[in-house]
Amino acid sequence: MNQHDFLVVVPVADRPRHIQACLTSLRALLRRYPYAGRIRVLIADDSADKTSIAANRAIAGQFSTDALEVIHFPPAEQLALVRSLDINLPRVLGDAPPDNFGHKGQGVMRNIAYLKAAALLENAPPDRTLIWSIDSDQEFRVNVTEEDGYVVDFFNGLDAIFTNTDAQVLTGKVVGDPPVSPAVMTRNFLDDVLAFLAQMAERDPAAACGHHAATTAAGDAAYHDMADLFGFKPAASYAYPCPLQGAHTEADCFANFNCRVNSFFYGEHPTRISGYAPGDLFASVQPARTVYAGNYVFRTEALRYFIPFATLRLRMSGPTLGRIVKAELGPRFVSANLPMLHKRTVESGGQSEFRPGIATQATTIDMSGEFERQFYGDVMLFSVERLTAAGNLCRLTRTDFSQTLDEMRSALMERYNTRQQAILERLARLDALLADPSRWWHGQAAGFGDFAANVRRNFGAASSGHARINDAANWAQWRGRLLDALTHYAEDRAAWSQLI
């Protein structure tokens, strides 16, 4: 039997260095593990900057060879495709202004890219091509030392699973930086920072660094402040694994963490980096419930699933889609041990090239936009989880949706507010350590000081994010938007099915 062809869909928004690294890793992977089937990459360009669009187009040309076809799908072509449709789908495809058809959000961009994928595959043999959705800040390798991490034969492994099982949708995971927002990792990270400083307080700054002991890779949701929501046990504090090489001191390690700590607000979690655990691939295949939007593979018939509620720009859209897919596909929705390396930041300054919802000015970081999208993303996720357990989402009523949203918002707001108090208690301890003149690092911890200020700004009593989620008028607006999206979901599914 011929091997499957692959169409790899990569949304990218003003991240040319990320897409360059992603495709470089793909080329290295295929040198290590050649694949007989056809591989095409669709760069779904959601950039707003013309320079980024030109750079992404050039990168596509650079990597497109006889063995690998890279297609650049720019905003102008996306707009033309959307305008050519006979069906209007504003909640699925958005309504971005035609003069700047960028920064539509990953959900809307993926949905438009799936329409492009359907067009590219219109004449392909049924079930011949697998569509693989990834993120531009990921690489086709894992974080182990063997030959820079190229130890996973992704394409041949995926081909084998889809050849030998009836799986319709398969999700992998990520290793490296956590796939969630700092909005839901801050309490755990504060625990790790406090544990690090407590160790440093007992050590001689001139002594050899003692932060190179073997560390335990973070397991499922170990980075998440509310891991129990997902069925996992909360994790204890994790040690900081010093990345410095050669002879260096405790003070050198401290300085390294001090310079790096604010990268947390761009999605790093330097103490809880997810690691790759090798194992038998087929033994790892099991029923799934969460789609990692940046790493999932599906047969062409699963193009009937779009990213739900995309125009709301909610975080947790992948897990929300996963609950819907699980309810409809059951055991044909699976996960497997095929994680990709996730790298939130680029080399210079520990910042992401582009990250929606994060506003930066010098050392000041405001993540209130992302915080709000995270909270209401959680409300939608756990509402959909409850609703799909009760029946087909397309057959439930507005009353079902309304009651569930109210109950979930109330329960999650209590959790978020309780967690805020836990964060403030830890922040007070951090402030005391940094202000103590008897500590050997006094006057040398500006990075930790900036980190503490940003925690206070984003989680303190005056934080904009917490004010928004507790505001009744703001909830009334969000409630209307969430309710509208759920109420029209069946209509949107029916319209989408006419397009695919």
Image: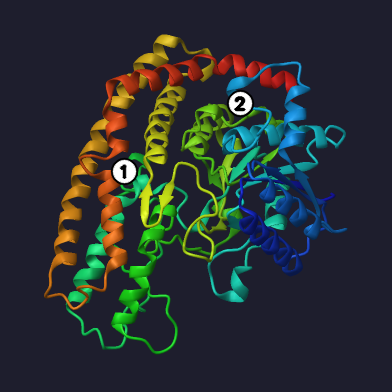
Q: Is residue 283 visible?
A: yes
* Horizontal arrangement in the rendering, residue 500 relative to residue 108 (left or right): right
Disc nearer the start of the sequence (1/2): 2
Say which residue appears at 33% left-offset and 75% top-offset. Answer: 255
Q: Neighbour class for label 2 at 10 Å: few (<14), some, many (≥20)?
A: many
Residue carrying label 1: 228
Q: Nearer the viewer, residue 200 or 438?
A: 438
Q: As displayed, is residue 100 above or below residue 182?
A: above
Describe the element under mark 1 as helix, strand or loop. Answer: helix
Q: Is residue 392 visible?
A: no
Tell me the amino acid under the disc marked 2.
Answer: Gly
Give how far across and how far down residue 151 sits, in percent: 62, 68
Q: Nearer the viewer, residue 150 or 196?
A: 196
Give how far across and how far down residue 239 sits, in percent: 31, 68
Residue 471 is marked as: none
Q: As displayed, is residue 464 above or below residue 242?
A: above
Say which residue appears at 34% left-offset and 77% top-offset. Answer: 253
How many marks the image carries: the answer is: 2
Give how far across and how far down residue 42 sits, in percent: 74, 45
Q: How is the image coloured?
A: rainbow
Describe the element under mark 2 as helix, strand or loop. Answer: loop
Q: Nearer the viewer, mark 1 or mark 2?
A: 2
Give how far across and how far down residue 94 sits, in percent: 61, 26
Say which residue appears at 70% left-offset and 21% top-offset. Answer: 497
- Place residue 197 in its image quadrant: bottom left
Q: Nearer the viewer, residue 251 or 287?
A: 251
CA gap, disc 1 and disc 2 = 34 Å
Q: The C terminus appears in which quarter of the rendering?
A: top right
Tell me the amino acid under the disc marked 1.
Answer: Asp
Q: Neighbour class for label 1 at 10 Å: few (<14), some, many (≥20)?
A: few
Residue 94 is marked as: 2
